[in-house]
Amino acid sequence: MAWTIQAFERYVAARTREQSAALAAGLPATAPVRLDWTVRTALREDPDGRGVRQYEHKTWGRQYASADGTVRELWIPSFGRAKTDRPAAEKAAIAHVVAQGLPARRRARLTPPPATSLVNPVPPERVRVFDFGCADGSVTQLLDWEPDTVRDLFRRAAAPAFIAAATGTGVRPGASCVDCKVIAHCGRLPRTPALWGPLRAPLPPRIARRSISAWDLRLHGDCPAQYHLVRHLRLNDLTPENSGARRGRVVDAVLNARHAQSPLRSCRGLPQAHGSVLPSGHSLEEPMAQSVLRLLDEHRALCPLDGLASQETVLTQHRVTAYIPELDVVVLAVPDLLHTRRGRWIWRETKTSAAPLWEGRSLLRSFPQLALAVLLFDKGALGDGPRRGRVELEHLREGSGESRLEAIDPSRPATVAEAREVIADLAEPLLRDTSYEPRTGRHCQTCQVRSWCEQGTAHLSALASAPVHDVKRGSADAA
Ligand SMILES: [Zn+2]
């Protein structure tokens, strides 16, 4: 509710500002349009090859039109900042609906509404589309086109995308499995019943399918409210990541780009990393840049592509998807690198850290994504059976000799038993949760939904007033 009130107030302010600018520029004022603009193709006598007699094109967002119908606008809310651009096909598809659409009630089928109910039956002379950022109130203009431009770009950019979407028959398991209506008939999605063994207690009844990932498990383990707001409601207050997380992300980006190169090339033979390897948007001036370069040097001796034959498969950021049918849960994982080596799959996770691995805690406990990987191998989600795989943790630390490579054998019964326990400890409370109560702690400092959390805010204020603690977001919180 706190988020909605803020987003609403920001939206009204942004729209009022834009309207005054538009009026000053000589454009007519625009007012909300209630019914959805919808473009319908001509109704066919006989269904096409897919059994369809009519297609509808719609878009989503807040619609506005001038009283004389010459200007139409669409405002598309985004959760974080306003998007600065969208793909050409998407923009052309949106503009087509805004320019050509007739107001229609949702789910009205086949018959167009009577002409008297049309708000603006006249096609507009100008189509304007804006993106609005709910988290900061930012606005970007995505397009401002005349009808000829809309027609031309629709034909060139959007129509091929529509044809590909309407006629494509490929199967690509992933996050979309959560909404898939034919999941029961899918031959490509691996089934992993009882992934972590039998449930410790029955789950509450639930109607909707859901997904879990290692990230979900970690967020929920830290704080159920954070998990719910970030993963279900997708809120984000644009709190910057801490420097450790940012550094890890830059190292990941450089390694992914290197490892995706064809033909395969190990990093071992590369010269010492220097400024030019940093991804665009990062410079050597940043305090973390030198640290990134040192971590990349540490990686060279541990590169998974070292000695790898050219015909082996190397997949960077490949999504591994599995389905637990009795729980109606889709499991999503993205290994940093997945590759074959002499007939077995190797799952590599790369972590950067300022601290050494803590010997007092098992690897699977410290990094639940390793436990999830072990279970996915164990249930054959990677295709070849457990004895054919290996899970690796590459732990990069600055300072020569500090980095390590740990190998985990997913065919060892003791390893599987431990992985089951680790995942059950995290997944079952998540699946059983129905209230998502906040749990305050260290994670509040970098929580990206803390702006809307009373308990988290109170927790940080208490820390800030206690002088012994170092609160990184100090001044903002005190305010
Ligand atoms: Zn490498």
Image: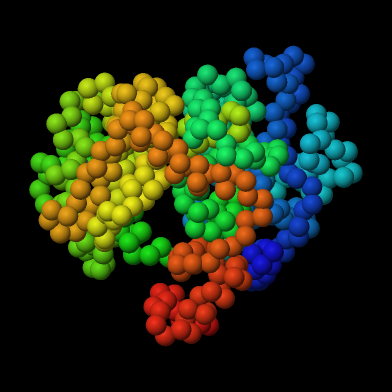
Q: Position of residue 182 (x, y in %)?
A: 63, 24
The mark tally for this picture is 0
Could you say which is closer to the camera, residue 119 or residue 451? 451
Classify residue 359 as left or right of residue 332: left
Q: Which residue is drawn at the image coordinates 36% and 34% (left, top)?
A: 414
Classify residue 107 as left or right of residue 133: right
Instruction: Quarter of the image for the N terminus: give it.
Output: bottom right
Could you say which is closer to the camera, residue 114 or residue 136? 136
Q: Position of residue 324 (x, y in %)?
A: 55, 30
The answer to whether residue 313 shows anywhere in this view is no
Q: Quadrant of residue 422?
A: top left
Q: Tell me if residue 111 comes above or below residue 274 in the rendering.
A: above
Classify residue 372 as left or right of residue 272: right
Could you say which is closer to the camera, residue 458 or residue 23? 458
Q: Tell me if residue 244 comes above or below residue 101 in the rendering.
A: below
Q: Which residue is drawn at the image coordinates 55% and 70% (left, top)?
A: 456
Q: Tell me if residue 165 comes above or below residue 356 in the rendering.
A: above
Q: Which residue is drawn at the image coordinates 72% and 56% (left, top)?
A: 64
Colour scheme in use: rainbow
Q: Position of residue 431 (x, y in %)?
A: 60, 44
Q: Tell me if residue 401 comes above or below residue 341 in the rendering.
A: below
Q: Position of residue 468 (x, y in %)?
A: 39, 82
The answer to whether residue 466 shows anywhere in this view is yes
Q: Which residue is drawn at the image coordinates 53% and 30% (left, top)?
A: 194
